[in-house]
Image (cartoon, rainbow, N blue to C red):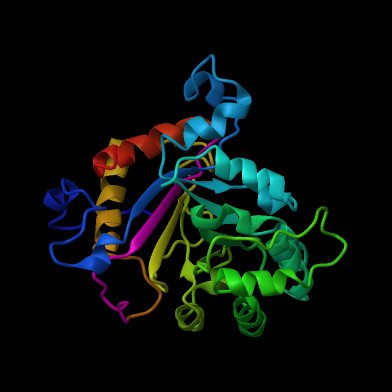
């Protein structure tokens, strides 16, 4: 998918996107967060992390370079509350985590018979991230076709706040490896993002369903391997940049970074780029501002940290 330049964005690119519009309190609460997918990669120790940094200090260091980081470990296995507590403790107050949903739910159960797996996932300590918990990312397998009934059931079962997540977590089974964690400081909204990878999802019914559930469709950028769409279906936008050429490995050059900065500013301002890649003909409702989450997943060849920092600089976030 090739992104073309939009008009009237150079001036806006010099503005601080996280600053409120004058007199608009709603906009003041909306943020742009740029980050990376994961933080523990061997090659980063020679290119991103200081040479003398100990491995257990990597998250602490990375969380002070970016506004958010995706947690990948939750995709592969249930974590423990102590692990979430450690992650919370070593990161600064304004930092946020996006958490990848369990592949047991998405890839093995394939969104069917999911009540107990969801309970286990939310009981595993996720709520211990408390005020640092950002969106939950549900990544579907590439061979999963769109099934309206199955997806509707899944989306309807996702808890929408901490209280609902705790209620669901109480139905965990003995697959949970530790005592359930049901403690948090106050009830907060839970946000969900869906990343599909099969062309059959490019349909109006998906958009209507996602908007009805306020679930963001991930803007998942690759070399064209997976469908790309910029259909805004929630009150926030979630972008994953997997690499423009070689998947997970290729670099976004200065020109590409400039174009992404322009698109981020459009989404953050509550509108969308004039050439947005969409499924439907009807534009999304205009808002005063939107939260925008952008994660670089081109991690294999060391480009993600540099790309993320460069985009933050273009957006005056550093």
Q: How many marks?
A: 0
Q: Quadrant of the N terminus?
A: bottom left
Residue 264 or 203: which is nearer the viewer?
A: 264
Q: Position of residue 171 (x, y in %)?
A: 78, 73
Residue 129: tell me if it is visible.
yes
Q: Main secondary structure of the magenta part?
A: loop
Residue drawn at x 51%, y 44% as measured from the top left: 297
The image quadrant of residue 276 is bottom left
List x then y, in percent, for residue 179: 80, 56
Up-down: is 179 above or below 54? below
Residue 283 in the magenta stretch? The answer is: yes
Residue 232 x %, y % = 38, 70
Q: Is residue 135 left or right of residue 27?
A: right
Q: Is residue 5 magenta?
A: no
* Picture residue at 39% right of the left edge, 66% below the top: 236
Which image quadrant: the C terminus? top left
> In this view of the protein, can residue 38 be seen by the observer?
no
Magenta stretch, residue numbers: 282-300
Would you place residue 247 above or below residue 117 in this image? above
User: For residue 211, what is the image quadrant?
Assistant: bottom left
Which residue extends farthest top?
Answer: 52
Question: Does residue 11 appear to the left or right of 138 in the view shown?
Answer: left
In the displayed structure image, the side of residue 199 where residue 143 appears, left or right: right
The percent coordinates of residue 51 (x first, y second) are 52, 15
Q: Nearer the viewer, residue 203 or 88?
A: 88
Q: Residue at x 39, y 39 (%)?
A: 308
For this orientation, the residue located farthest to the front is: 185
| 48 vs 317: above or below | above
Which residue is nearer to you in this view: 281 or 297?
297
């Amino acid at each position: 998918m090739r992104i073309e330049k939009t008009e009237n964005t150079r001036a806006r690119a010099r503005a601080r996107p996280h600053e409120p519009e004058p007199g608009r309190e709603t906009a003041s609460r909306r943020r742009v967060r740029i980050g990376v997918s994961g933080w523990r990669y061997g090659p980063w120790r020679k290119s991103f992390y200081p040479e003398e940094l100990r491995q257990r200090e990597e998250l602490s260091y990375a969380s002070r370079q970016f506004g958010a980081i995706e947690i990948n470990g939750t995709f592969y296995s249930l974590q423990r509350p102590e692990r979430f507590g450690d992650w919370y403790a070593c990161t600064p107050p304004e930092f946020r985590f996006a958490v990848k949903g369990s592949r047991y739910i998405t890839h093995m159960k394939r969104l069917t018979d999911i009540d107990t797996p969801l309970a286990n996932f939310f009981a595993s300590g996720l709520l211990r991230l408390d005020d640092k918990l950002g969106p939950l990312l549900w990544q579907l397998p590439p061979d999963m076709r769109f099934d309206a009934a199955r997806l509707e059931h899944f989306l309807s079962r996702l808890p929408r706040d901490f209280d609902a997540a705790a209620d669901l977590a109480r139905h965990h089974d003995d697959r949970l490896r530790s005592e359930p964690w049901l403690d948090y400081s106050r009830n907060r909204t839970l946000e969900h993002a869906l990343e599909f990878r099969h062309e059959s999802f490019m349909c109006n019914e998906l958009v209507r369903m996602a908007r009805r559930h306020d679930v963001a469709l991930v803007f998942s950028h690759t070399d064209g391997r997976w469908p790309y769409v910029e259909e805004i279906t929630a009150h926030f936008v979630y972008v994953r940049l997997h690499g423009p050429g070689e998947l997970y490995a290729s670099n976004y050059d200065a020109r590409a970074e400039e174009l992404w900065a322009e698109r981020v500013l459009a989404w953050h301002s509550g509108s969308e780029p004039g050439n947005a890649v969409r499924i439907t003909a009807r534009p999304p409702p205009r808002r005063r501002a939107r939260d925008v989450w952008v994660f670089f997943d081109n991690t294999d060849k060391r480009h993600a940290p540099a790309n993320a920092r460069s985009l933050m600089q273009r957006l005056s976030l550093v």
